[in-house]
Image: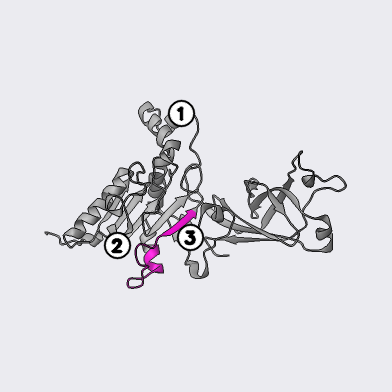
C-alpha cells in the first residue's frame, strides 16, 4: 500500500517444492483479483505432483508468464526427483531434462565441489541433477554473450538428430533463465501471446562444469549420389567431428550415439555444441565403421568400408550463420 507495486511486477523463483509453492501463490492471488507477474520453476518436485490436477501443481495459469527448467525428470523409482511433465508457458529441458553432464561421479568429487563439506557434498551427490536447475538459472543472471539458447522441438531425440531449428526470425528458439520473459514477450507481444495451456518444450545442451552455457551447431552431412557411391553401397558407423577456426580446434565430438546406416544420396543431421563461439573455418570429419560379427550384411570382404561425402553444412543457432 505504501509504495503501490503491482503484483504483476513480482517474480517468484522456486526450486523443487518451492516451484509448486509459487503456483499456489499465483492461484491464491487470483482468488483476490490479483495476478502474479512471473513464476520460475526450477526442477519442480515430482513425487505426488506428476499427472495431478493443475490446482495442486505449478501450471501456466498461475502467472502472466511461467517458465520451468527440468533437470532431473527420471521416474522416482529410478532416482529422479523432478517433474518431467510440461508445467509452464515455456518448459526447458537441458540435456533432455533427465540426466545432467557432470553428475554421477564419485562422492569425493561432490565433497570437493562443496569446499570439503561432507553434509553439502552428500546432498550434491544425491541430488546433483536436481540442483543443476539452480546452477543454470544462477549463471543466466549475469549473461555476458552466451544466451542459454534452447530450440523448440517435439522430443529430445529429434533435437539430438538435428531435426529442429530456430526458423525464420528465430521464432522457435527461446532463451532459458533470468532473461526468458523478455525473449518470450519479444516473440509474442501483449495481445498476441499464445493462449494457455499451449506449452512450448525447448531443448538445449550444456557443459558439465562452469560456465555451463554452450553454443549450438546444427550439422548436416550429405552423402554423395555418384555412380561410385551408389556402387559402393551403404555402410554402418559412427561420425566424429572436430570444429574450429584459425586459432583453435575442438576435440573430436561423437555426433551419433547409436550406429547409423549411411546410404548414398541421403542426408543426416546432428546437434552439437562448443564452449566458445567460433566462426567455423575448420571441420575435420572422422567416420568409424561398425560391423556385427553375426550379421554378414555389415561386413566388407571385397572392399574397404567408407563414405562418399558430398558436403557438410554447419549452422550456428546463436548467430543464424
Out of 117 and 172, give the one closest to the viewer: 172
Going by the image, does 157 lie left or right of 297?
A: left
Residue 80 in view (yes/no): yes
Q: Is residue 8 above or below residue 135?
A: below
**For the residues carrying marks 1 and 2, which lies nearer the camera in this image?**
2
Give the numbered dot on residue 64.
2
Out of 282 and 317, give the one closest to the viewer: 317
Q: Residues within 10 Å of mark 1 (few under 14, many from 20)?
A: some
What is the quadrant of residue 233 in the picture?
Answer: bottom right
> Residue 141: x, y in percent?
37, 52
Residues under labels 1 and 3: Cα distance? Answer: 35 Å
Task: Look at the numbered disc 1 and give the secondary structure of its residue.
Answer: helix
Residue name at image x 45 percent, y 42 percent: 74
Out of 321 and 69, give the one closest to the viewer: 69
Boundaries of the magenta span: 183-203
Give the numbered dot on residue 152.
3
The single residue placed furthest to the left in the displayed view is 2
Going by the image, does 23 lie left or right of 294?
A: left
Residue name at image x 47 percent, y 47 percent: 212
> Residue 77: x, y in percent?
43, 36
Amino acid at each position: 500500500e505504501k509504495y503501490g507495486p503491482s503484483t504483476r511486477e513480482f517474480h517468484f523463483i522456486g526450486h523443487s517444492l518451492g516451484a509448486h509453492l509459487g503456483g499456489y501463490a499465483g492461484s491464491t492471488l487470483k482468488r483476490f483479483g490479483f495476478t502474479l507477474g512471473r513464476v520460475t520453476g526450477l526442477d519442480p518436485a515430482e513425487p505426488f505432483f506428476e499427472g495431478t490436477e493443475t490446482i495442486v501443481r505449478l501450471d501456466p495459469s498461475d502467472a502472466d508468464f511461467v517458465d520451468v527448467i527440468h533437470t532431473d525428470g527420471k521416474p522416482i523409482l529410478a532416482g529422479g526427483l523432478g517433474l518431467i511433465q510440461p508445467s509452464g508457458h515455456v518448459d526447458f529441458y537441458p540435456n533432455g531434462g533427465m540426466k545432467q553432464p557432470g553428475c554421477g561421479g564419485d562422492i569425493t568429487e561432490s565433497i570437493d565441489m562443496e569446499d570439503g563439506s561432507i553434509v553439502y557434498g552428500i546432498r550434491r551427490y544425491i541430488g546433483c541433477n536436481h540442483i543443476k536447475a539452480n546452477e543454470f538459472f544462477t549463471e543466466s543472471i549475469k549473461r555476458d554473450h552466451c544466451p542459454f539458447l534452447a530450440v523448440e522441438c517435439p522430443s529430445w531425440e529429434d533435437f539430438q538428430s538435428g531435426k529442429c531449428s530456430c526458423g525464420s526470425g528465430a521464432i522457435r528458439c527461446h532463451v532459458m533463465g533470468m532473461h526468458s520473459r523478455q525473449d518470450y514477450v519479444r516473440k509474442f507481444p501483449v495481445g498476441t501471446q499464445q493462449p494457455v495451456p499451449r506449452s512450448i518444450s525447448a531443448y538445449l545442451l550444456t557443459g558439465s562444469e562452469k560456465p555451463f552455457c554452450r553454443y549450438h551447431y546444427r550439422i548436416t552431412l550429405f552423402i554423395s549420389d555418384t555412380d561410385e557411391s551408389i556402387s559402393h553401397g551403404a555402410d554402418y558407423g559412427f561420425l566424429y567431428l572436430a570444429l574450429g577456426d584459425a586459432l583453435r580446434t575442438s576435440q573430436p565430438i561423437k555426433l551419433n550415439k547409436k550406429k547409423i546406416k549411411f546410404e548414398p544420396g541421403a542426408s543426416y543431421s546432428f546437434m552439437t555444441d562448443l564452449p566458445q563461439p567460433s566462426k567455423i573455418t575448420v571441420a575435420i570429419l572422422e567416420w568409424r565403421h561398425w560391423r556385427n560379427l553375426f550379421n554378414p550384411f555389415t561386413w566388407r570382404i571385397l572392399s574397404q568400408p567408407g563414405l562418399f561425402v558430398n558436403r557438410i553444412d554447419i549452422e550456428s543457432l546463436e548467430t543464424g550463420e
